[in-house]
Amino acid sequence: MSNMLTALLAITILSISACHAMGVIGIDYGTESMKVSLMKPGEPFDVVLSRDSKRKIPSAVAWKVQERLYGSDAANLASRYPGDTFIGAKFLLGREYDDERGRARHAGLLNTKLVPNAQRNDTTIAIERETDYTINKEGADVYSIEEIVGMQLSHGKALAEEQAGEEVIRSFPGTIGTYGGLDVAITVPVFYTAAERQSLYDAAQVAGMKPKLVSDGAAVAINYAMTRTFPKPEKHMIFDSGAGSTSATIVEFSTKTIQADSILSIGATQKEAIVVDVLGAGWDREANGMVLDVIVRDELARQFEEKNAGKISKPLSQQPRALARLLKEANRVKHILSANSEASSYVEMLADEIDFRGSLSRQQFESLVEKAGLTPRFGQAAKDALDQTKVSLKDITSVILVGGATRIPLVQASLRSAGIPEDKWAQNVNADEAGVMGAAYFGASFNPQFRMKAIKANDGTPYSIVLREQDGKAETIFPAGAVEETLITRTYPGATDDLSMQISYDPSINSEKLDGQQNALYSIELADVHKNLAELKTEGHLDNVQTSVNITLASQPLGVVRVANAYLHVKQKSGGVVGALKGFFNVGGSAEEETEEEANNATTADADADANDNSTTTKKEKPAKKQPPTERHIALTGSIKPAGSVHPMSTGELKTASDRLYVADVVMRKKAAREEARNVLEAYIYRIRDTVDEEYFKKASKSAERDSIKKRIQELNDWLNAAEGDSAETAALKVKRVSLETLVSPIEKRINEQRVRGKAVRTFEKALTQGKTFLTEARANLTEAMQANLASKFTASELDTFEHQLEKDSKWFEEKKKAQDKRALDEDVVLPSAEVEKRAKKLTDTIKKYQKRRVPKSRPAKKESPPPTKAEEEVPPPPEPEAKAGEQKGEEEKDQATHPPRHEEL
């Protein structure tokens, strides 16, 4: 019975959820570019294309005056508006304003102006636009890093929503937004700290998403496992060298029996699945593709300044537009040098109207990187991963190469120098798209409605987390490695005052691995302990109780720690309950005790009264007195505050940022709709202006009509060029277009009728001929069938009805055709082609329906029996004797029992 109820509940849940389509968006957010994928039933599982049909979307947002641009449009605008174009924002996620490392990496790109975030106490980084385009010149716009990244993520989300035909599940903290049915999973670098992960998560919330986060190494591993089986456990290294960092993740693949996560798996609660465990990682934030771009850019700038010494007004380092153009050219040169030994460079009018021509060889490039001390750092990440996990290279089945920088020869040489032989390398996944495909699959694995290969990923953090109590005792509570959401409980017996403790990364972790960020993570305060025990302390009864505090901490896959619950447990010591103890343990019990005593008194009084009235009445027993409680559990307020100055965005901050983004999106959509309406109007005006004097247009129109059209075109041109047209809204532009269409449409209809009427007339005449032929043959067949006393396909009434319709359509056609023939080409039609085609189709369909009909089977006539002779007439049976009344009633009851009453009898 329980299983049946569970199944019915599951079907009910699925039927409710089926009202909203499901799907998962995967986003691989990179420093230079991002990829978006979509997994949705009925859609091919693939990468979502950008507006310009590219599979890779630049991680950029830019403003052209007040117009906001994304992707390739934003990246291309950097050479014109470098101060209003923002790239490489990923470098600044989760960073304090005083953090020199993140700011230095970002400053080397477009020299974007970074300012303290005033909305968050000047502790985090914000970006300020170079140009003030506000109406009142109140100052240039300032955006937090979460808002900038949120805009980019919002663009990727919008592309996926358009392809899916539905929206991401609503998660706006404010009142703005809509409901949809898509989930989201976003990749994060495996080495991200809790502050960086939280910052990326906040950016996703600003964009209207509440994603699942998965490390980039785990996402690639999931994609690798999608097309493979693992009869035996295997260890692999995911070597990822991209635009923002280089990392090496050690993962283990195995096939295990796990708990089924589907509510429909009744009777079979376990299933076989591929399990991906993230064992550890090594990384280097400085070894990345963007650093190589900057090295090439600086070399090209040096060549330009050397060739044009004395000709340029100021160094290129002081010319942001020239540096932005050179950075784009440097990226192109770097890609060429990956496959060629030399690359030529040309930038037209780079600075002071001087063209730049230069070249760079692969040897020069590698020498520059070596001089910067970066070459060995790429391969060092792989060695660090092996050391951190204590896994031997011989136990590694393969080294899977992903990321664009793995195609650069010097990166491959660095990997060889680190002791990773080339025969271990594997290029059996898409180096650019494995992460985004694995991210979507990771998100879908949490939805039991998806029917797909079972892959369970145990993502992990490379940092051990330590709990330091207020007595100074430190203990590792969450070790590094593969973790799911894990709970640990700590008990503090004898606690009588508020408690505090600290959570941090293991102090032994090298500061370089944390990229200069502090080890401290959170401070935890357990309040209300002293407050709840204040009465006992005041009355001096604290020695009569035993106290303890229990706190449960949860480590989430997000990489952060939270307080799951906290309780104060107070238990009475042996020796009775008196005074303050009675009131403490029986909180809220005074009224209950009073009610109980009144009830006892009433019971006794009733019993005495009954005894006086009736001596045989037994006296009612008094209920047993309820024993007072001797212990109490009190929920405590457990607050956890991030250490340092980088805190998660509050609900109010999220609402303000998400509403600001939403309003900006609405303004952008309205502007795009207005521009489209204006473009459509202008294109329509130009087309009609060129058409109105064409010969075919003159034949179908009167002179007065053409004059009205020309006059209207002139009025619309003047209106568009005036101030009123420049500021007109979308609705006004559409009304203006309709005013011209009203004059043109009748003429275009005549032209179209002249073009298609001949074919429509021929089709109708053919249908009439077919109808008449069919009617003649059908009547002949009906007559033959009736004479032979056989069934026919048609009845006489059906043929009469068809004949009537045929005559009616024929008469209508002849009258309309005569009237149309008398009309000039510049007059409105009276024989519309659409009506002619409609009637022809109706006739043809009726004929086909009758022709497909089968002749019904004829039944042979029943033979009549000869009348009985007089001798054979039946003699009526003798009457039965009357039954007694009792017997008759019994027979009736028996008959009703065996033959229930009919419906009409009921």
Image: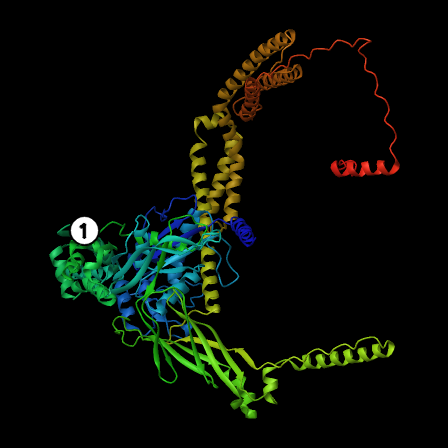
Q: Residues within 10 Å of mark 1 (few under 14, many from 20)?
A: some
Q: Give how far across and how far down residue 743 sits, in percent.
A: 53, 35
Q: Give how far across and how far down residue 94 sits, in percent.
A: 35, 69
Asked if residue 460 is positioned above or below residue 338 in the image, the reply reads: below
- Image point (66%, 82%), residue name: 590
Pick whichever, 260 or 310, lies toward us.
Answer: 260
Q: In the image, is 803 to the left or to the right of 619?
A: left
Q: If the image is split into quadrants, where does the C terminus sit? A: top right
- Image point (44%, 81%), residue name: 492
Q: Give how far across and how far down residue 384 sits, in percent.
A: 22, 66
Pick whichever, 776 or 613, lies toward us.
Answer: 613
Residue 153 visible in the current orientation: yes
> For the image shown, how many numbered marks are present on the structure?
1
Q: Which residue is mark 1?
A: 336
Location of residue 269 (image quadrant)? bottom left
Q: In the image, is 285 to the left or to the right of 847?
A: left
Q: Give how far across and how far down residue 626 sits, in percent.
A: 65, 79
Rendered image coloring scheme = rainbow
Q: Label 1, secondary structure: give it.
A: helix
Residue type beneath disc 1: Ile
